[in-house]
Amino acid sequence: MPSKEDPKVLGKVADVLKSEDDLTHIETIIGSLDKEKSSVDSQIKLEQERGMNEIQGMINNMQTANKQLKLLETNIQKLKDIQKASTSDRSVSAVFDKAATTLKNFLDIEELYTGFKTLAQKMDLIEELMTIEVPKDAEYYSETSSGDNILLIHYELNQLRDFRDKVEIMAEKSTPDIQHAADNSFVRLDDLISRFDHILRMVVDAFVDIMNCENYGLIIKLIQIIQFEEKEDMKLQLLDSIFSTTSADNTESSQKVNKLHMYVKRSHVRSYRMKFDEYFEKAIKDALDNIFASTDRAEILQVLDDNYYETLGLYRTIIKRCFPPEWNYFLRIIQWNQEGLRKLFLDVLDDDLVSNSTVVEMLNFEYENRKKLKELFNLSKTDIKSCSILNKDKMDELLEDKEPPDTKEEKLGIETAQTVVEILKSNINALAELGDSKILIQYLEFFAEVVLKQYYDKWDTALSQEVKKWTLPAENENGEITEDITVGFMPRYITILANDCVKLVDALDGQFKEVKKLLHSNFHEQVEKIAEDASGYAIELGTTCLQKLNGFIVVEYQPYLEQVFSKEWYKSSSMIEYSLEIVDESYMGPLEEFLHPELYISLFEIVFDQYLLSYLSALFYKRKIKEPKFSEKIERDGILIQQTFSKFDRAEIVPDQLYILDILINLSSCEESSEYVEQWKSAVQVFNDLPLSFIKIILKNKGLSDNKTSIIADMCNGASKEVAASNGEDQASTFMARFHDITTDE
């Protein structure tokens, strides 16, 4: 209530009593207020009574509903009792079945209406999620994806597929028009299913990358999807099996089948577990195919040895953490990898031209592979046998077939280096068990200074003797020249030895690294020095092999290059073309297939440098230089030389080395002494060790007097010293430093 001092109350009183005459109306006002109060009280009482009546009515309704529920419960129980008592009476059972079917049909209609109403909206959602997860033009799946969208896509897609299966079953009893309309409604769904399958394939293809970044969450989500699909397929298969074995007359079994049917929503097996296995198997074998396709055959086994078992180790860790144990999936991963290797190995070994060295390397890999599968992954003998790369029959066949066809297409490389390394490895292991570091060091010194030196000396002597038989005419006991008895395929044998030297260097490097692990760091510097000495013999022998191969080439093309700068040379380029044909078709072309890549690059540099030197050495036949034809023919030859050698130029040295022909043209075109000196100064900027014999023979062939030749040569010598002083003495040597070494005058 407001207080007596409430301004609003006082204001209202003031409005009523504005004058003294108003006081006479107080009684009237009080009477009016009493009447109004009585009216309000009556209305309040009526509202209270009405509210109480409504509450009482609600209570009565609740009591009535409770009684009805109890009655319904009683009736339901009675129905159950009646149903149980009448199971032998088919007519009674049929009534209950029809009643249940009617109720289910009402529910199905409601579900059908809702499903079609939201169908397009749900497919839009799925497509949007797919685009977010994997854009349509994406070639690879992101290994860092959380996989949340994949789970959501699968859930929504699975709901739509279940709905479609239900609609198809219902439409089987409908008219063809309705069936066709139902099919058209789900055309887009098939595209979404195909796209989802493609996403799963992309995830599996990226599995190694996913493992490397330890994205366990994505893997677990993927496995959850496959597990769910596998479980749902098994439910359907179980139901189909029960249907096929349940008699129609067996009411109890039929009831159980109907109950099971409530838990099976699909009508077709979707086979995602099988798809998952197929995707995985293909991804593994494709990866191995890529290794074999993109890696040189000589390096394949090393690449596999470096990465194969490490990748299997990653698989084991991931499978242990994320895969169901009952799948036993790691063994399947190993089997698929081994099957992939088996196919690729057999493709190589079944080639009639496969070399002995390749056979031996692959047999060794198979032997080590079995050991590592047992040691690293604890595979049983049965498992190892089931997934071996080569079976016993194939290994026996390869061991008996010791000599492959002797053709130039054969891959080369013999095993003497392997024998040397096996000796070293065996002795290192034996000495390591003694635990005496000094004795081990002494043995390594003996191996490097005695064994490998003897290895080098024996091969060097054999090379020199056999090369003479190949390059020089044979003599009888009286010293008379007889018919040429050259040893066939000598270049091929030397190529084998050169390849062997590369293997030996690599193997020695590996063995000495292992030795360092066995010894205290105090001995490491000493071991490195011994390793350098040991490898030096193999490197030197390999270099000798390349020089001998180059010698064979020179012997064949030299007769043609001796005609350079002659009268015939001005008329035709045939001698250049013949010489280049020998280099290309008889040596550099075939050797590109036979020779180790690193050796091939080194051989190319030796052959190219020597070819240019042999070409330029024809200047010493003192044939007159005829300008301007001389320069034109040099340019002609330069183009031919570049076209041939550029095909094999891995180091891209041809343009730089051919610049010597530009220098020859520039010097041969000079007239005044100052011009010679200026051109010479420019030449020694590029070829800092260009010998004076080069300018001297050019001057002589141009017909200059000895006196003038000597003066110009002295001036050029001064220019060389000036350039050397300006550039410093640490200039790298060039091939032209050997120009004077190969001339026929000296």
Image: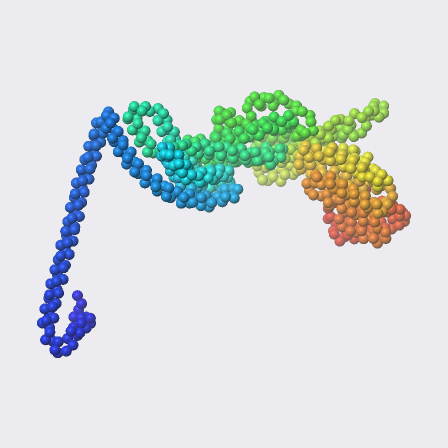
Q: Position of residue 229 (x, y in %)?
A: 41, 35
Q: Give the camera-side residue of 308 and 51.
A: 51
Using the rendered image of the protein, determine whether residue 97 is visible from the camera's viewpoint: yes
Q: Position of residue 395 (x, y in %)?
A: 58, 23
> Where is 383 relative to 13, above or below?
above
> Whole-percent x and y of residue 364?
59, 28
Identify the residue at horizontal 82%, vertical 40% (top origin). 617
Q: Of 447 and 685, which appears nearest the observer?
A: 685
Residue depicted at 20% across the width and 36% down the height: 73
How many labels sit on residues?
Answer: 0
What's the residue at 76%, 37% (across, down)? 580
Nearer to us in this view, 387 or 455: 387
Asked where in the image residue 551 lies, by quadrant, the reply is: top right
Residue 104, how many percent across, how many down?
30, 36
**Which quadrant: the C terminus?**
top right
Q: Pick the residue in front: 368 or 646.
A: 646
Up/down of 423 relative to 318, above or below:
above
Q: Is residue 585 left or right of residue 86?
A: right
